[in-house]
């Protein structure tokens, strides 16, 4: 199977990324609606009086982080769509690909920072209000921490890949000048 060009693996990945983009956009919209409904329905009910403010706050923080990371993920997927579009058009050593990969790296670090902020906020809320037992606290905090580390490592990995790609373009340009 061809890797580059029309009807190749890169064009199929590009199409898959477009489908993934639509799915995540749909999930973001649903998350926003559910978060808004949940937040406003709780503020109008008597649940605040019954000391559920901490639960509402925790749910809101987690929903905002999920929504924010979903929006940033849309930008990451869009950058990858542009990279695979260039690959489909046989533009391997395009300087725009460097820009796209740099954006992916930065956005991945942004997602990692969002998860770290979520980790801090949920840790404070869980400890202050004693909402869950210790095992649930550890599981929630570990899961958020793992997501933060995964996106940080992904961002650093893409940054390294981008630097290698930059060097490849420099070598290609030097080679073209010597010929």
Image: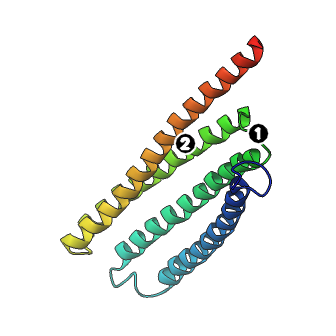
Q: Quadrant of residue 97?
A: top right
Real-space Cα separation, disc 1 to disc 2, in angstroms: 21 Å
Looking at the picture, tell me which residue is in the foreground, 178 or 21: 178
Residue 112 position in % (x across, y down): 45, 50
Q: Which residue is mark 2?
A: 105
The 10 Å Cα crowd at callout 2, few under 14, some 14 to 19, many 20 or more, is many
Quadrant position of the N terminus in the picture: bottom right
The quarter of the picture where the C terminus appears is top right
**Residue found farthest to the bottom:** 46
In this view, the residue in front, 7 or 74, is: 7
Look at the numbered discs 1 and 2 and tell me whether their residues touch, using CB distance below 8 Å: no
Camera-side residue of 138 and 155: 155
Q: Secondary structure at mark 1?
A: loop
Q: Quadrant of residue 13?
A: bottom right
Residue under the image location 34 percent in, 85 percent down = 50
Report the side of 94 relative to 120 (left or right).
right
Specify whether 21 is left or right of 160: right
Q: Residue at x 69, y 50 (%)?
A: 3
Question: Can you give x and y, in whole percent of width and height, for residue 2 in the image?
Answer: 71, 52
Q: In front here: 166 or 149?
A: 166
Name the spot of residue 65 as percent of width and height, x first.
49, 62
> Relative to 151, is 129 on the left or the right?
left
Residue position for label 1: 91
């Amino acid at each position: 199977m061809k890797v580059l060009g029309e009807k190749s693996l890169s064009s199929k990945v590009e199409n898959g990324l477009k489908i993934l983009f639509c799915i995540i956009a749909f999930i973001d919209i649903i998350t926003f609606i559910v978060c808004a409904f949940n937040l406003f329905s709780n503020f109008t009910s008597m649940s605040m009086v019954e000391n559920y403010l901490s639960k509402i706050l925790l749910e809101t923080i987690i929903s905002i982080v999920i929504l924010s990371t979903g929006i940033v993920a849309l930008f990451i997927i869009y950058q990858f769509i542009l990279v695979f579009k260039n690959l489909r058009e046989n533009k391997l050593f395009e300087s725009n690909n460097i820009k796209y990969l740099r954006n992916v790296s930065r956005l991945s670090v942004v997602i990692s920072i969002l998860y770290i902020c979520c980790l801090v906020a949920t840790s404070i809320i869980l400890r202050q209000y004693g909402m869950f037992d210790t095992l649930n606290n550890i599981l929630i905090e570990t899961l958020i921490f793992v997501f933060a580390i995964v996106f940080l490592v992904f961002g650093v990995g893409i940054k390294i890949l981008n630097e290698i790609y930059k060097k490849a373009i420099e070598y290609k340009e030097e080679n073209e000048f010597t010929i």
